[in-house]
Image (cartoon, rainbow, N blue to C red):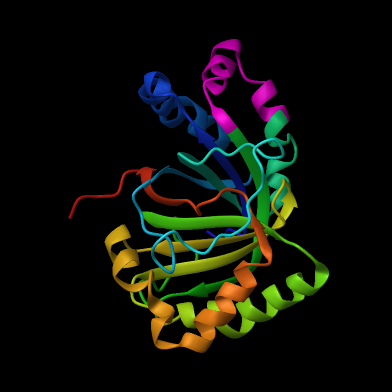
Amino acid sequence: MRDGAYWITWYDLAESDRQAHIDWVHRSYIPAVLARPGVLWAAHYAADVAAVPLGGGSGRVTRHAPPEDLPGGKQFILMFGAAEPYAFADPTPREFNERLSSADRRMLAMREGERWNLMIDEARVLGPESADPYELPSPAIQLGTFNAISPAAEEELAKWYARWRMPSMKTLPGIVRVRKLVSVAGWAKHGCFYEFSSLAARNAHFIQYEDRTPEMAAWSVRVVNTLVHATPRTPIASRIWPPTPSV
């Protein structure tokens, strides 16, 4: 399946609503979206709040959108993939949700801090853990979304991805695939969707991978300082649907 376009929703849930909402998403909402023409797959993730960010410690994010400008949901990430973004534009995500039954809209109303983006591939690289660039998204992910503070910063961001970040992912253990994303609709213009074979593999190989190349680590810090992220911490999450087979 040759995907390249994504409807991504981030949101939080009150503890009292959590299981009922998740059950509804998996039994009713996901099948309804998958029935839309052109939609290829769905993947639902729960954030790992204890995960260590890239670089260790408190991470590298220095700027993020204030909550009055952008809802800050981060506990769950619901993704749908298609070959092209207009599979999600007729109807749009907002129109699709408004056309649901009143019972379904009550379930959607449980979400807190909800935001969404329609995004497409700018670039994609395959890591050593997969030979299939179009398989279902991996059991463990990191998905950051952000804007650059200026045109010059955006130019530097493109250079950094082309010369360092994307090439360096091709040989890093634990990497299944990395997709650099750009936006069709939504707050963030940019995104980077890292896929790992497991959270353990991410933690073992990704967190400090730049330590052996200090000049690249310094470049990364400079680039990140010119970005405004959606949230103070980049979401790191494990897939809860479809379930990961036991081994």
Residue lying farthest to the left in this orientation: 247
Q: Position of residue 78 (x, y in %)?
A: 51, 41
Task: Give the image quarter of residue 87.
Answer: top right
- Residue that appears at 34% across and 76% down: 173
Q: Which residues are magenta?
A: 95-113
Can residue 148 be seen at all in this image of the molecule?
yes
Front-most of 22 and 211? 211
Q: Position of residue 227 (x, y in %)?
A: 67, 62
Residue lying farthest to the top in this orientation: 102
Residue 186 lies in the magenta stretch:
no
The quarter of the rendered structure image containing the C terminus is: bottom left
Residue 98 lies in the magenta stretch:
yes
Residue 150 against residue 86 in the figure, above or below: below
Q: Position of residue 126 (x, y in %)?
A: 47, 74
Q: Position of residue 12 (x, y in %)?
A: 49, 32
- Along the horizontal axis of the image, is 184 left or right of 125? right
The count of marks equals 0
Front-most of 41 and 77? 77
Residue lying farthest to the right in this orientation: 151
Can residue 83 be seen at all in this image of the molecule?
no
- Residue that appears at 67% across and 29% down: 96
Residue 1 against residue 130 in the figure, above or below: above
- Residue that appears at 42% across and 75% down: 127
Residue 175 against residue 216 in the figure, above or below: above
